[in-house]
Amino acid sequence: MSDLQHKALAVSDSNHLPTIGQLPSGPRNAISDVAGVTVGHCTLAEGPVQTGVTVVKPHSGNLFLDRVPAAAAVLNGFGKSIGLVQIEELGLLETPIALTNTFSVAAVAQAQIRQCVAANPETGRSLPTVNPLVFECNDGFLNDIQRMAITEQHYFAACDAAQVNVAQGAIGAGRGMSCFGLKGGIGTASRCCDGYTVGALVLANYGQLHQLILAGEALGPLLAERLAQINEPEKGSIILLLATDAPLDARQLRRLALRAGVGLARTGSVFGHGSGDIALAFSTAYTVPQEAQQAMPAGAMLHDARLDPLFQAAADSTEQAIIHALWHASSVIGRDGHQRHALADLLPEQTVPSLHHVNHENSDLH
């Protein structure tokens, strides 16, 4: 048996994907295990256009009027996201979280503004202006990013498609993304502890193949040798989103967001120079009203001494979500014939049957 076959067997048995940590997952093993959270995708997959939009909604109500606490942690700031300055200052999220490619941030942000104005006609008049929140990764290897194919309607379509059953892999914003030189994309997972849930969703577009570690096994060097892949400078990014129903304030949520970096590092990432690695955490435990005459929420926050299990859940669910992004991704050929192979297609079928019987229905385009 080859070294690759030994490593492959170590990260998977005949029935299941690798499971990270000892904490149980929620029923869907997805960010939507946090009650009220939904995810929607809009995917563009035609020839050189391989891209899309993914939206995460913290709740189904009017987010501009009923905001949720949130905080971001920039692990490496080579990114072009919009909306983080106000998140840092106020610690509040007032639009859905949008993910897309680097050159489509402006189009999606404008769509978020239009959406808010349509729902709240006094936005920017008697009410404050809205803070759009759009994260990005560069999918330019597979996608002709210069076409700027994403329009406002694609954002609206992703919002309309939001649901609790989260599709993963080469879908939505993940359609054109690469991860460790393989096909990356959207992944999600959850962990439960002390009566609370932490859910993670990642847009995985980072890493060099020789760095790849899955469930503690260094598969990267063996796969790099098999593909004869040359190590190129880090040009990717990853967006790491965490949702929880634990009652945390913005300061505590920033601490939680930082623990997503633990899960990221376990997969072999070193937060490379050219990688925009940004985490954001939000809580659904309470909302904060936009209008001053509305009552502020009452209730105590979780004591800091009780945060460690949530930190563990954040690290484990993030690592699991990255594994899911790789496992569920299908191979894609994009612009100029560029191709990214799916991880499941590269491992030996005779030794890792689970990788060829994974339920790939979540990777279908919707």
Image (tube, rainbow, N blue to C red):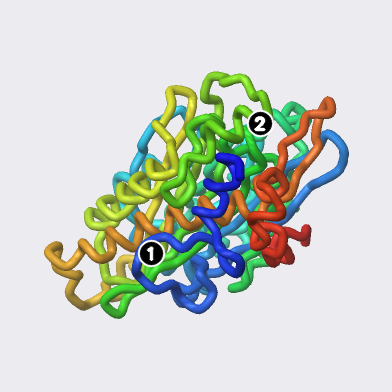
Disc on the earlier residue, 2 or 1: 1
Rendered position, 232 above or below 35: above
Q: Residue at x 34, y 63 (%)?
A: 313
- Percent of width and height locating residue 7: 53, 46
Q: Which residue is mark 1?
A: 68
Q: Secondary structure at mark 1?
A: strand
Question: In this image, 184 relative to 195: left or right?
Answer: right
- Percent of width and height locating residue 263: 38, 49
Q: Quadrant of residue 1?
A: top right
Q: Residues within 10 Å of mark 2 (few under 14, many from 20)?
A: few
Q: Secondary structure at mark 2?
A: helix
- Percent of width and height locating residue 127: 44, 58
Closer to the camera in the image, 361 or 42: 361
Closer to the camera in the image, 243 or 325: 325
Rendered position, 183 above or below 23: above
- Percent of width and height locating residue 135: 52, 43
Looking at numbered disc 2 in the image, what kind of residue is underneath it?
Arg
Q: Separation of disc 2 and disc 1 at Cα? A: 47 Å
Closer to the camera in the image, 210 or 36: 210
| Badge number at residue 113 | none
Looking at the image, the residue that sits furthest to the front is 1
Question: In this image, 319 relative to 231: left or right?
Answer: left
Q: Residue at x 77, y 62 (%)?
A: 366
Looking at numbered disc 1 in the image, what kind of residue is underneath it?
Val
Rendered position, 121 above or below 280: below
Q: Which residue is mark 2?
A: 226
Closer to the camera in the image, 32 or 207: 207
Instruction: Report the mark closest to the observer, 2 or 1.
Output: 2
Query: Taking the image as drawn, is residue 285 in sight?
Result: no
Q: Quadrant of residue 94?
A: bottom left
Query: Taking the image as drawn, is residue 319 in sight?
Result: yes
Q: Residue at x 52, y 24 (%)?
A: 234
